Image (cartoon, rainbow, N blue to C red):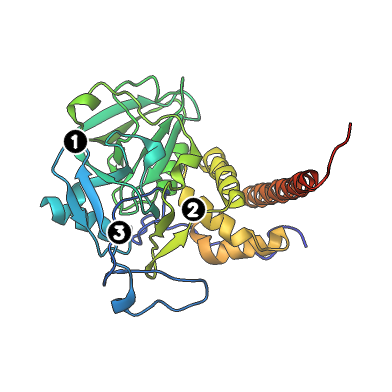
Amino acid sequence: MPLGLGRRKKAPPLVENEEAEPIRGSLGGVEVGSGGVAALQPGLPPPPASLRPRLVFHTQLAHGSPTGRIEGFTNVKELYSKIAEAFKIPPVEVMFCTLNTHKVDMDKLLGGQIGLEDFIFAHTKGQRKEVEVFKSEEALGLTITDNGAGYAFIKRIKEGSVIDRIQVINVGDMIESINGQSLIGCRHYEVAKMLKDLPKGRTFTLKLTEPRKAFDMISQRAAGGKHNSSSQLGTGRGTLRLRAKGPATVEEQLSAFEERAIEKVDDLLESYMGIRDTELAATMVELGKDKRNPDEFAEALDERLGDFAFPDEFVFDVWGAIGDAKRKFILLAHVTSNLTDFLAWCQNVSIFI
């Protein structure tokens, strides 16, 4: 059966209110008691609230503040609300969070996956700016992500691109509007598509909000512009996974196969769609790792991620990336097993000269 035969895709909505499950990261401090997250094992229902682990995390505002403690959240929006409550600011002021650094480092973004050993820094709204951009090339050189709560912002700027030549536009800037059309509430892929669809050879207007900066961050042009997917996958011994639907769950670290496959799929997302989203890539790997052929994978994507309306060519490439990572992982495991057996044999053999 050819790939995509009989696939029915839903057109992506202009505005999606449900929170996203974007990037991966990590976090700090664990206490046991009652709370709002569930430690689940596959196939088991969530435990009663009285038996769920109480995870207490430490946080600061990235531009400087005392340390706060937050707990009892199960998704990204609730996390931002808890941070806002801790520092007595409106939740809409929180743009995004980084882990273990107060800098605008896109390799340390907090999203749908949070490790249990890290510290949260919340970046809040700073200066607003309006920029006229002449689209001299088809590609602007932007990679877009979102915070899971209605704000899309710049994750990466390609060196030498149209946007790279405009010094006032920086990594971390939230895109408020394009030509007066508000983007608050839009997903990252919707914003990326709107930018791609702008006609070449014309000028358009961007309204941006940059994150509030500490003194030592004032001179930064594009911190985090370089990407390193592996650093987003969590550094703690376990991770707290935030979900758009259902309770948050405490999970083990990813396998070597999963990490490699997620990195490759994330690269494909940037290549095809102009977005990076490690959590989306992880979801696609999870859907594809047990499928027998690309058509089964395509059907699973349509059922779970139909709003993205992925083209068949992209789906086929993702299927190939997952399969390639799986083959290399199996080969490495086989070689490692043989080497281990050989070394064990050597230890039991006496060599005579």
Q: Residue at x 19, y 35 (%)?
A: 63
Cα–Cα gap, marks 2 and 1: 29 Å
Disc number lying in front (1 or 3): 3
Q: Which mark is residue 30?
A: 3
Q: Nearer the viewer, residue 202 or 149?
A: 149
Q: Residue at x 49, y 53 (%)?
A: 280
Q: Residue at x 88, y 35 (%)?
A: 352
Residue that protrudes farthest toward the right in the picture: 353
Q: Is residue 329 above or below residue 144?
A: below
- Name the residue tied to disc 1: 63
Q: Position of residue 126 (x, y in %)?
A: 18, 36
Cα–Cα gap, marks 2 and 3: 27 Å
Label 1: few (<14), some (14–19) or many (≥20) C-alpha neighbours in 10 Å: some
> Horizontally, is 247 left or right of 322 in the view?
left
Q: Position of residue 289 (x, y in %)?
A: 64, 59
Label 3: few (<14), some (14–19) or many (≥20) C-alpha neighbours in 10 Å: some
> Horizontally, is 268 left or right of 92 in the view?
right
What residue type is disc 1 on? His
Q: Quadrant of the C terminus?
A: top right
Count the marks. 3
Work out whether residue 89 can be spotted: no
Q: Nearer the viewer, residue 10 or 157?
A: 157
Dot 1 falls on a residue whose secondary structure is loop
> Horizontally, is 122 left or right of 89 in the view?
right
Label 2: few (<14), some (14–19) or many (≥20) C-alpha neighbours in 10 Å: many
Q: Residue at x 31, y 32 (%)?
A: 205
Q: Nearer the viewer, residue 259 or 34?
A: 34
- Name the residue tied to disc 2: 280
What residue type is disc 2 on? Leu
